Amino acid sequence: MTSANRLCFLFAFIVLGFRASGVACRRTAADMAMSLRHERWMAQHGRVYRDAAEKDRRFQIFKRNVEYVITVNDAHRKYKLRINRYADLTNDEFKASHGGFRPTPTKAAPTFRYENETIVPPTVDWRSRGAVTPVKNQGECGCCWAFSAVAAAEGIIKLKTGKLIPLSVQELIDCSVYGEDRGCNGGAVEDAFEFIISNGGLTTDANYPYTASDGTCDAVKSSSKEATISGYESVPGIGEPSLLKAVARQPVSVAIDAGGPEFQFYSSGVFTGKCGTNLDHGVTVVGYGTTADGTRYWLVKNSWGASWGESGYMRIQRGAAGAPEGLCGIAMYASYPTV
Ligand SMILES: *[C@@H]1O[C@H](CO)[C@@H](O)[C@H](O)[C@H]1NC(C)=O
């Protein structure tokens, strides 16, 4: 026995008992370090597993994810990943519970009010104009569609009325049974806009708070309509130039392919990685710009909490070569409410 293995045996014996300690000690010292890292991560995120088998399974996933993050970061790309609270989930598990976008053909009338905008500012950040509420966390509820619609509505209402009113995502989850809307099982942004219009508005997030689960529509709360939209339009075509015109004037709901593990662990920088166009996640574009090294980007508000990405935001490359539909399909399915 090497001294590392002796230590390991002692440690494993204390933690796991005699039977498991032999198995554990066939692990290398590197695995030991990884194991400790997993323990620290579990404590940090309050994670508890039901038994040793589940813990070992989660450890193997954690280890693969740590190695993946290190590999990507060592490649010195324009963006960095980091281990976060999703570190013990496979990418399939993550995708199943943190998206919720159902692609549907657009129902908007074929008008695009910004089609003749010829001059757009070089940089837009609707946060600096006070038109964006704090980032929220959808949790394990596939209701990105509702967060995306609410953020776009909050934005245009602020720009038109001067008031930034955090609106109720939960009301959409519980009460919008329009079209594709299925609460935590996914929905479509345009159907959410349809609900807001026909309901005559949405109540506030404070009055009808988020629970990250499906509920029965509270008609009393839903009848207290704090703000509304009067219609919505979709950005025509699949090109980024049209999306730019719209985002220059207001926050815009978009759908992206957020299926890759790089999204799960995105930390900072402009995402320039590989990405498909299998739209599975609804987010809101709240600006755009160009970095000091000339990389153009979209500024995206996500709903995975403020500890994910850049305080809850992600920058996705704009004008990526070979992606006429926008990287991750960002310009394929964009719409915005009107007031
Ligand atoms: C854009 O300009 C064209 C040509 O002048 C005009 O027909 C069209 O109505 C304009 N679109 C909007 C949304 O104002």
Image (cartoon, rainbow, N blue to C red):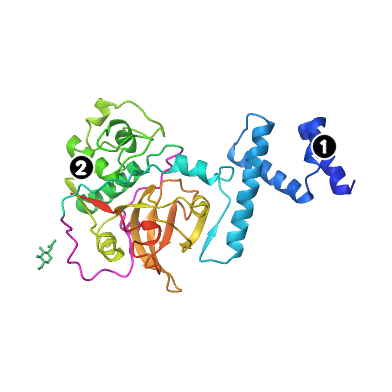
| Magenta-drawn stretch, dominant element (helix, strand or loop) | loop
Q: How many labels does the image show?
A: 2
Instruction: Name above or below for residue 168 compared with residue 323.
Output: above
Q: Which of 113 and 308 is in front in this view?
A: 113
Callout 1 environment at 10 Å: few (<14), some (14 to 19), or many (20+)?
some
Label at residue 228: 2
- In the rendered structure, the answer to whether residue 315 lies left or right of residue 325 reads right
Q: Pick the quarter of the image with the N terminus.
A: top right
Mark 1–mark 2 distance (CA, rounded to whole Å)? 64 Å
Bounds of the magenta span?
A: 111-139
The residue where tag 1 is placed is 22
Is 130 covered by the magenta stretch?
yes
Q: Which amino acid does label 1 sit on?
A: Gly
**Picture coordinates of residue 2 (x, y %)?**
89, 48
Q: Nearer the viewer, mark 1 or mark 2?
A: 1
Q: Which of 317 and 302 is in front in this view?
A: 317
Could you say whether the residue bearing mark 1 is in a helix, strand or loop?
helix
Q: Which residue lies furthest to the bottom in this view?
A: 293
| Residue at position x 78%, y 39% in the image | 24
**Picture coordinates of residue 169 (x, y %)?**
33, 38
Q: What residue type is labelled 2?
A: Thr
**Looking at the image, is mark 1 or mark 2 earlier in the sequence?**
1
**Picture coordinates of residue 29 (x, y %)?**
79, 49
Asked whether the beta carbons under mark 1 and mark 2 sit within 8 Å of each other, the answer is no
Label at residue 275: none
Q: Nearer the viewer, residue 162 or 106?
A: 106
Instruction: Name above or below for residue 319 compared with residue 328.
Output: below
**Picture coordinates of residue 118 (x, y %)?**
21, 70
